[in-house]
Amino acid sequence: MKYGIDMGHNAPPDVGAASRFGREDDLTKKVGTQVMDKLKALGEEVVNCNPSSASSVLNSLIQRVQKANTERVDVYVSIHFNAFNGSVNGSEVFAVSDSGRRIAQPVLDNIVGLGFFNRRVKNGSHLYVLKNTAMPAILVECCFIDSEKDMKLFNLEAMSNAIVKGLTGKLPVTKPPEIPTPTDKEQILKLQQTLNRLQIRDSNDKALVEDGLMGPATASAVEKFHEIMGVNGGKTAGAVTWQLFAEIESQPTLRPNHAEGSAVRYVQFRLGDTIDGVYDESSADFVRQFQRQQNLVADGIVGPNTWSRIGGKIEYDLSLKIITDTVLKQEPIDSSEISDSNLKYPITAGNELALHSWGEEGNHIKVAFLGQTFNGFNTWYAFSDHVEIWEKGEPLEMEPEGEDPQVEQRSDSFKLPGYVSTFYLSDPILPGGHFFWREAIHNGDRIPQSKAHVENILALARRLEEVRDRLGGFPMTVTSWYRPEPWNSQVGGARFSRHLSGQAIDFIRPGLTGRQMASRLQNWPGGMGIYRRYPNLLHLDIRPYRARWGGA
């Protein structure tokens, strides 16, 4: 099969689109060159249809068509990248004839298989190179060069492979690079030293033992480095690997909106930024934050001083270290209970993130990240057993507060109707429970007037232990419980309020609104209500039937 390959544009004044992610001319040339090399490796005949120069855009197109027609190629493939306004993404292929569409579909299918949105095979009768070539022809719009989503997905090798496999149904067998593949102890030792110097850890997040042996740990670190660099190098350090090492260790000066490539990807990796190889304002903000933490001039320019800090072990004043694969959450509950993917963020062990502040909430830690957001949020909850707080490069250690035994005479005692025992305000209502008499009877101001009221308080306390568990096991702040007259009238309570007999409670669960709590307690068998003026409060009572109000 004889293929005519047209690397779109690349013949001034015929030039392609451009964005902060790169120039279409550069990308079409890179993809087209790889496509031609891979087709040749499969034994196919290839004709480069790009003109060396052109007097106009039309002249450029005419030359491409003439080359294909003169050489009598069997299939003509024009490679392009799309552009619109930054809000559109996806891949599409244009064709004119039925035979062209049959060629276009598998090419598009393979590209879409990389994760790009399918914009379908489309009619290309308006395109000069398709309607004037004498053979089946397609024009491939690989993806949108001005789409952040597309350019994060784009990988040169993968895109080239997709086009070739779509055209031929197969890919050439590639041999592993021969030079300088580490085959001897000296070369492997140099590889280990370089990876350690760049802080590239193995699959267990440990530094490599520099023993000159190519074991699983070293192989996993090589693979991790390739993933960071966005290349498909696997676990073997080849010529590309060493070239990338050299580019990073040359420590080029990086300026916002004027740098891209492997050095940028490395800086993004070290600072916890999204790795896309483009040094835009977002990445510059990460650098400025890092510079401030390291007491450097926060100008966003990665020069010698910043490189010296990035290249070594980064120590934050305060940081969160992920010790087990976990999920950051917008609520301190099990991640399986959160259906909205924007409200949770999976993160792998080994990550360390700079913190502004932190605090404990039950079995979770609430953290505010310094200079970093996930899904648009910088404040998240993490399960305590999956993370550690570090300070200045060491696990944080805090002295527990001293607790003196209570030996003094207690003065918070009271009696309850129908009971001979003495009760205390600071005692839990139920043995080992989480709700106290002082909460139920307003610090002793509202002693129950009958044994029936006491029984109501006990019954509600038992139900509230279940409620507490269903809301994540966190402390609940009681704002109103037992409220006999005259207190009920004084606060505007309903004439037959369940608070009058100790059957109702109003409370706050920090971190949740009344509506969120009601959602988790949908099958509550009694009364449940939300106050319009106090949306973070929830009312519950143990009336013998279901009642709802306020949107609960």
Image: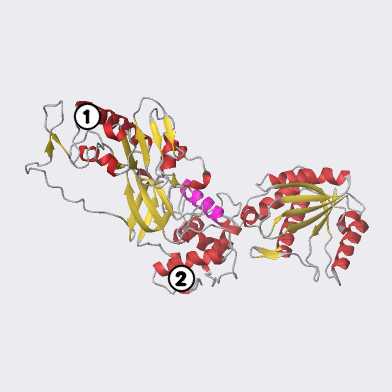
Query: What predominant SS class does the magenta segment belong to?
Result: helix
Residue behind mark 2: 306
Residues at circles 2 and 1 in contact by the CB criterion of under 8 Å: no
Q: Is residue 267 above or below residue 424?
A: below
User: What amino acid is labelled 2 in the image?
Assistant: Thr
Q: Is residue 456 left or right of residue 4?
A: left
Decide whether residue 226 is among the magenta residues: yes
Residue 363 at x, y percent in the picture: 33, 43
**Which-is-in-front pick, marks 2 and 1?**
1
Query: To which quarter of the image does residue 550 belong?
Result: top left
Identify the secondary structure beneath mark 2: helix
Q: How is the image coloured?
A: secondary structure
Decide whether residue 136 is among the magenta residues: no
User: What amino acid is labelled 1 in the image?
Assistant: Val
Q: Is residue 54 left or right of residue 213?
A: right
Residue 454 visible, this angle:
yes
Residue 446 at x, y percent in the picture: 20, 38
| Closer-to-camera residue (46/268) | 268
| Closer-to-camera residue (220/178) | 220
Residue 194 visible, this angle:
no
Residue 505 at x, y percent in the picture: 31, 37
Identify the disc placed on residue 428. none
The magenta span reads: 215-228
Identify the disc placed on residue 454. 1
Identify the secondary structure beneath mark 1: helix
Q: Residue at x 84, y 60 (%)?
A: 49
Q: Residue at x 78, y 50 (%)?
A: 93
Question: Around disc 2, counting alpha carbons within 10 Å, would you say few (fewer than 14), some (14 to 19), or many (20 or more)?
Answer: many
Q: Residue at x 67, y 53 (%)?
A: 157
Q: In 3D space, how far apart are the residues under numbered discs 2 and 1 (Cα atoms)?
A: 68 Å
Residue 221 at x, y percent in the picture: 49, 52
